[in-house]
Structure formats: C-alpha cells, structure tokens
C-alpha cells in the first residue's frame, strides 16, 4: 500500500487513529442525526423546552458529516483505480437519490431548486480532476494556480446554477483539501475558514486529521445506499405524519 507524506509525520501519527471505514460511519451517523432533526424534530419546535435543546444538539452533531464526505472525495480521487467509474457511480446514485431527497427536504416528489449532495460530490470530483489534468500539462506553478482558481470559480457558478446542496462551499473545500493533500492540518484549518458560518463544522474538519490512510473494512453497497435509503424513509415519514 502506498504511503504518502502525511502519514509519515510522527507528530500526526498520534492523532491518526481512525481508518476510512470508521470515519465514513461516523459521518453516516452524523448525517442521520442531522436529517432526523430537520425532518422530524424541527417541525415540532415551539419556543423553549426539551425539543429545542435536543434539536440544537443534533444540529451541532450533524455538522460533522460534510467535511468528512468532501475529504473522502479527494482521497478517493487519489486512490481509486478507476476515476471514471467512481464519477459514474456518484452520478448514478445522485439520480437514484433525487426523489427521496425532494421528499425529505421539500415534501414533494420533484424540486428542481434544490438537488442532492451526490451531485455536489460528483462536481467536486470533476473539478479536482480537471485541475489535476491541467497540472500535468503546465509546469509553471503560478500559471497553474491561476487557472485552477478560474476552474474553481466556474464550478462554483455551476453548483449555484444547479442549486446543489452546499453549492459553492463544497467546491472550495474540495479544492483546499486537494491543494493541501499532504498538509492535512492546514487543509482542515483553511477548509473550516472557508465555511466558518457553519461554526460547528470544525468538528468534522478536525476528524479528517485523524485519518490514518487505511481503508478499513468497508461495504461498498452500504456506502452508497445509506444516503438514498435513509432519506427515503424520512421522506415517507414526512408524508405520513404530514409535517
């Protein structure tokens, strides 16, 4: 297994306690907590009380997921054996997830004004893929950085035009993780600053630094099906409970 520079840093080794599978499942739990909060708790909030405190706690815990998922898009870009297949899979599950996502978020079967995170992650992958391809052809670093920023700007505009979940924030975070791939602490810190309005996302960015570079025992189908299945269930509950 290839060992990259960031996993050779003795100071970081003490922090790198989680493998890829463990971090992804932490992100899944965070996502589930956040989505349960949005779908089943938030509609019943009425001033102060237990539900409000529970909702606030769930909202904080729910901020862990996003940085981890974007982090693993960049990690997947570097480590997958077939980038084209990786991209097609993301797009396929984006299509599969769209109706459940609209049921969950908007209580309709189709909402063109808000599209799910799988499409966002696919656009993140496309963006860093293009930037990396340009890097191979341009030796001048100043020119390459300038072009990469333009590419990021275009992708951000596309994300906003398509109303993707997390829109341009995801593109910028993916770019930062890509640029600082061998400097995980710097990447996490700058990534957090780029979306600091999500104050508690610092928890998720901090978790990315704990990655030890090992894949861990993963189930591919759980990784991809968790998202559409759980939002479908929550969407059905919203219709059933009329909330």
Image (tube, rainbow, N blue to C red):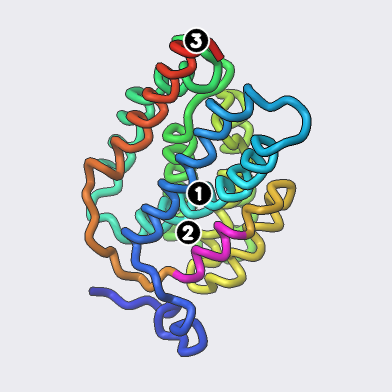
Residue neighbourhood size for the residue with mark 1, other residues' Cα within 10 Å, grouped as few (<14), some (14–19), many (≥20): many
- Residue assigned mark 3: 108
Where is 135 relative to 211, above or below? above
Identify whether 100 is placed above or below 79: above
Secondary structure under tag 1 reads helix
Tell me what residue is drawn at x 37 percent, y 31 percent.
230
- Select label 2 or label 1 by which is in front: 1
Looking at the image, can residue 208 be seen?
yes
Tell me if residue 133 can be seen: no
In this figure, which residue is indicated by the disc labeled 1? 65
- Residue 133, position as x, y percentages in the image: 42, 53
Quadrant holding the N terminus = bottom left
The segment highlighted magenta reads 203-210
Q: Residue at x 40, y 17 (%)?
A: 236
- Nearer the N terminus, badge 2 or badge 3? 3
* Circles 1 and 3: CB atoms closer than 8 Å: no
The answer to which of marks 1 and 3 sits earlier in the sequence is 1
Q: Nearer the viewer, mark 2 or mark 3?
A: 3
Residue 102 lies within the magenta run: no
Check contact, mark 2 vs mark 3: CB within 8 A. Answer: no
Between 117 and 230, the residue placed more toward the observer is 230
Which residue is rendered at x = 44% and y = 83% of the image?
13
Q: Position of residue 126 (x, y in %)?
A: 43, 42
- Rendered location of residue 56, percent (x, y): 67, 43
Mark linked to residue 135: 2
Q: Residue furthest right?
A: 47
Dot 3: few (<14), some (14–19), or many (≥20) neighbours within 10 Å? some
């Amino acid at each position: 297994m290839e060992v990259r520079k960031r996993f050779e840093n003795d100071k970081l080794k003490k922090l790198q306690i989680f493998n890829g599978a463990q971090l992804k499942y932490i992100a899944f739990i965070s996502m589930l907590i956040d989505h349960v909060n949005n779908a089943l708790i938030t509609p019943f909030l009425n001033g102060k009380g237990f539900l409000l405190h529970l909702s606030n706690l769930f909202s904080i815990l729910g901020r862990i997921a996003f940085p981890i998922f974007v982090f693993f898009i960049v990690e997947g870009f570097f480590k997958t054996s077939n980038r084209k297949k990786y991209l097609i899979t993301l797009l396929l599950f984006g299509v599969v997830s769209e109706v459940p996502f609209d049921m969950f978020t908007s209580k309709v079967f189709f909402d063109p004004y808000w599209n799910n995170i799988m499409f966002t992650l696919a656009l993140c992958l496309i963006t860093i893929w293009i930037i990396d391809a340009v890097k191979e052809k341009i030796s001048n670093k100043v020119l390459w950085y300038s072009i990469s920023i333009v590419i990021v700007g275009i992708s951000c505009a596309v994300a906003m035009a398509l109303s993707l979940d997390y829109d341009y924030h995801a593109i910028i975070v993916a770019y930062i993780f890509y640029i600082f791939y061998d400097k995980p602490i710097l990447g996490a810190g700058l990534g957090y600053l780029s979306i600091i309005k999500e104050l508690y996302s610092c928890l998720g960015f901090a978790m990315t630094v704990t990655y030890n570079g090992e894949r861990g025992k993963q189930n591919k189908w759980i990784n991809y099906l968790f998202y559409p299945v759980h939002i479908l269930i929550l969407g059905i509950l919203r219709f059933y409970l009329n909330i």
